[in-house]
Amino acid sequence: MIERYTLPEMGNLWTDFYKLKTWLQVEIAVCEAQAELGYIPSAAVEEIKAKANFDPQRVLEIEAEVRHDVIAFLTNVNEYVGDAGRYIHLGLTSSDVLDTALALQLVASLDVLAQRLEDLIQVIRQKAREHRYTVMAGRSHGIHAEPITFGFKLAGWLAEVLRHQQRLTILRETIAVGKISGAVGTYANIEPRVEAIACQKLGLKPDTASTQVISRDIHADFVQQLALIAASIERFAVEIRNLQKTDVLEVEEFFSKGQKGSSAMPHKRNPIRSERLTGMARLVRSHAGAALEDVALWHERDISHSSVERVVLPDACILTHFMLIEITNLVENLLVYPENMTRNLNCYGGVVFSQKVLLALVDKGLSREEAYAIVQQNAHTAWNKPEGNFHDLIINDPRVTQHLSPVEIAVCFDPQQHLKHLDEVYHRLDI
């Protein structure tokens, strides 16, 4: 069992309370910056910090009347602060607060996702190490190709997840951007120095050139990166579903005591978690499309993006978080059946070794076309019969035996010949 670290659950980062908390953080950071530059009294800022508070339910009550969420929030905060509240929000526009606070939510969400991704990396790495030499049939087009190991398959998953880890590191820098630049981004009523100081206090960078909002290409990038993670999780889930088919059964989702697979068929053990992950990936991908639509706003700003983001940003974060937890648990507890892998590898008498026979014949001087025809004829003869045996056909074909000795043929059918460079991949991934 991997070690889990205590972090806020993703859902907590997208509550009304947490959102309003980040709004207040931004407002106070701006007040502190204004005081440092001598624009408002330091005593007033201390009073604001001591008294400022909010009640989410009261904010909703005020919003029902004024029809403006930020005004409702400021009205409620001033009910706590009193006269010093007149220094709050000086020179700001609503999006200064909304977009800067949203960056804080997105950064916090990425921190949670990064830890969950690290959990998945640990689990895949361990499982890949465990099954480094568990030989199975590689497949292309769903058809047997050549031998691989289950650990090698997992190594490919690990490489993919490590790329996501690198992307999240970059994304955290990209998304950690705030703006305190006024109604159209020109700093008409507030100094760029206030923005710089406030953003520094919040752990953000000032946007290079904002309008009334931070350009939504940044947010579209955020959702697309989550969609990529979801797509990878779906790839892993689809592979598990395929390998769990009754006539394959090389791996299987853990089936707990008392679990039931079907209301009608008592024998069923279905890959329900993998199927659930496949469906969730579709949702996250759809959010990426919506986020891309948000990039094209009118002039310096409209609010067509706002309603979209209220759904897609929390939803994408929460879905991706859940998917990472699910796939981590699924892989950690995955049932692996090496004996079934061996059985499937050797079906039809080991047709997966056809290329080794082909190359051995070519090495003896046959043309590729001639060698291919010999090997293909034997492979297809074995393939088309329930009792077909490619190995037996090869060792009894004089066109083969006049060139290859029994020992040389045996080498062609040795799966270890396919694994001699496996260590190179494992070394690259530090498994």
Image (spheres, helix red, strand yellow):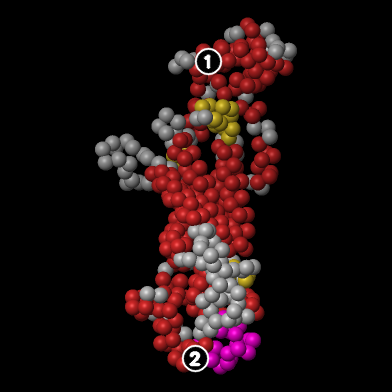
Tell me the residue that label 2 is attached to.
84
Q: Does residue 345 appear to the left or right of 274 in the view shown? A: right
The reply to whether residue 429 is visible in this rendering is yes
Looking at the picture, which amino acid does disc 1 mark? Answer: His
Q: What secondary structure do most residues of the magenta stretch adopt?
A: helix
Q: How many marks?
A: 2
The reply to whether residue 314 is visible in this rendering is no
Q: Determine which of the numbered discs, if any, sits on residue 431 in the image.
A: none
- The x and y percentages for residue 351 are 55, 20
Tell me the residue that label 1 is attached to.
380
In magenta, the rendered stretch is: 30-49
Measuring 68% from the left and 44% from the top, which residue is drawn there?
A: 428
- The x and y percentages for residue 35 are 60, 87
Q: Of helix, strand and loop, which one carries label 1?
A: helix
- The x and y percentages for residue 389 are 52, 15
Q: Does residue 357 appear to the left or right of 138 in the view shown? A: right
Looking at the picture, which amino acid does disc 2 mark? Answer: Ala
Question: CB under 8 Å between callouts 1 and 2?
Answer: no
User: Depth check: 10 or 343 in front?
Assistant: 10
Please tell me whether residue 132 belongs to the stretch shown in magenta: no
Marks 1 and 2 sit apart, C-alpha to C-alpha, by 86 Å
**Quadrant of residue 374 within the rendered picture:** top right
Measuring 32% from the left and 36% from the top, which residue is drawn there?
A: 267
Please tell me whether residue 36 belongs to the stretch shown in magenta: yes
- The x and y percentages for residue 327 are 48, 49
Measuring 56% from the left and 84% from the top, which residue is drawn there?
A: 31
**Quadrant of residue 154 within the rendered picture:** top right
Which is more N-terminal, label 2 or label 1? Answer: 2
